Image: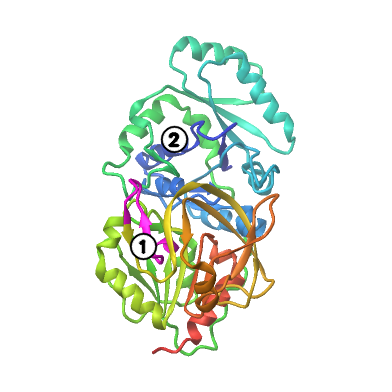
Amino acid sequence: MSCIISAPSTDAGKTTLSLLVSCWAFSKGLKLQTFKVGPDYLDQEQLSSIGHPICRNLDIFLSGEEWVKNSFYKQSNKFDLALIEGAMGLFDGLGSTHYSSTANVAETLSLPIVFIVNAKGQVGSLLALFKGFQELNKKINIKGIVFNNVNSNRHKELIKEVFKNQPIQIIGFLPFDENINLSRSNLGLISPLELKTKIDVEYFAKFAAKHLDFSIFLNFLKPTYRKINIKNTIDLRPFPKIKPIAIAEDKIFHFQYPETKEYLNAIGIPLLSWDIYNDQEIPKGAHTLIIPGGFPERFAQHISNSRRSLNSLREFYKKKFVYAECGGMMILGDSIEDENGYSHEMAGILPFKAKKGNLTVGYRYIKGEMNSTIIKKNQQLKGHEFHYWEIETQNKDKKLDSLFSYPWKVKSWGTRFKKEGWANKNLHASWMHLHLPSNKEALKNMLINHQQRNPN
């Protein structure tokens, strides 16, 4: 049966362990379907880079339990093995609750946990930690454990002694190795799209084979076969001709869920790719442009020098529709301050400057403030936010009232709603990330607008 790799806290080694298993499976010619709990893009990209089927996100808050079940069983049933990498600590979910936590996903899918624990400086305390997590929720079953940062045989033998009569299988001991350290930035792992050197799959595979007991681990990786309930897709039959959508996708903008393109393809929408990094114009024929999140602050000078792309964006906005999330929104403003504090000119469509601020992260409740292209008044959606940069508006009230409106108001756990975003008939831009395939109403609103727009 499949398992979920989890830990007491973040930075315990979940992604490292998931990558080790992925590389080992790849070296054996086995297809491993990976999943990631939560609205994570960077861990997902790392796991997708090994050569297996692309990693997919499972998020109960964003998508709901039914969607999570369907996605997990549909995708894992196709391949030899499957595993889920958890998020943060096992019980860390929405606000102070366990909702949408790794434990919540484990309970929803009835899957066991393989725990990875940072054992540095601990022996007997590791047992107290394990018992505490096991006792907190009796519906959660921690069946296997991997100890990280175990750098001597003496340390290993002492841990074995402590756990010898416990109802849990020890799967391995991982010593520190600088060759399997993962490159990080302020938002987490560095995307494989930006790394000059890729993961050494062969080295990771040999390391995994040496330090993990796959005679045990394989029992936790076999797919769980279940029937799935696929709901109806959006019906576009009233429209005789389906118009293309362009998506920005390059080493700058890549924060998108794979299901978005798959879903649009499945309902017959032609998709075109726009590469800002290589200064391309928006493909002719597109009637809607999606600019997902990314790291425009790292490439601000490069974007500013991409005159063909920015001019194309300005012209596109005049007649057609632009949907932009987070980093995608940032390039619509007047300028972006890069990581070194230098300001670079952007498209100048929205009246703000983007500059470095404090980390803003978390799930968001969203409520429609008006009837817009994405959301209707009082309609409710769910999204997430994840950025260090902030925007400083220029003559906000005057220009906002005349050219743009707030499409919605948003709140996080324990806070009040506040107005957010930018909207008019040709644009929706916001800090919010949506999982569009499971937010069917938002996607339906956008696609109906897309199909009804005048082709000129």
x, y percentage for residue 304?
29, 62
Residue appearing at x 40%, y 57% in the figure: 254
**Can residue 235 be seen at all in this image of the molecule?**
yes
**Which one is nearer the viewer's eye here, 325 or 20?**
325
x, y percentage for residue 306?
26, 65
Is residue 283 located in the magenta-colored stretch of the structure?
no
- Point out which mark residue 249 bears: 1
Q: How crowded is mark 2: few (under 14 residues within 10 Å), some or many (20 or more)?
A: many
| Mark before the other along the chain sequence, 1 or 2 | 2
- Distance in Å between CA atoms under marks 1 and 2: 26 Å
**Which one is nearer the viewer's eye here, 93 or 358?**
358
The residue stretch that appears in magenta: 328-343
Quadrant (top left/top right/bottom left/bottom right) for the N terminus: top right
Quadrant (top left/top right/bottom left/bottom right) for the C terminus: bottom left
x, y percentage for residue 409?
63, 64
Residue position marked by numbered label 2 in the rendering: 16
x, y percentage for residue 19?
42, 39
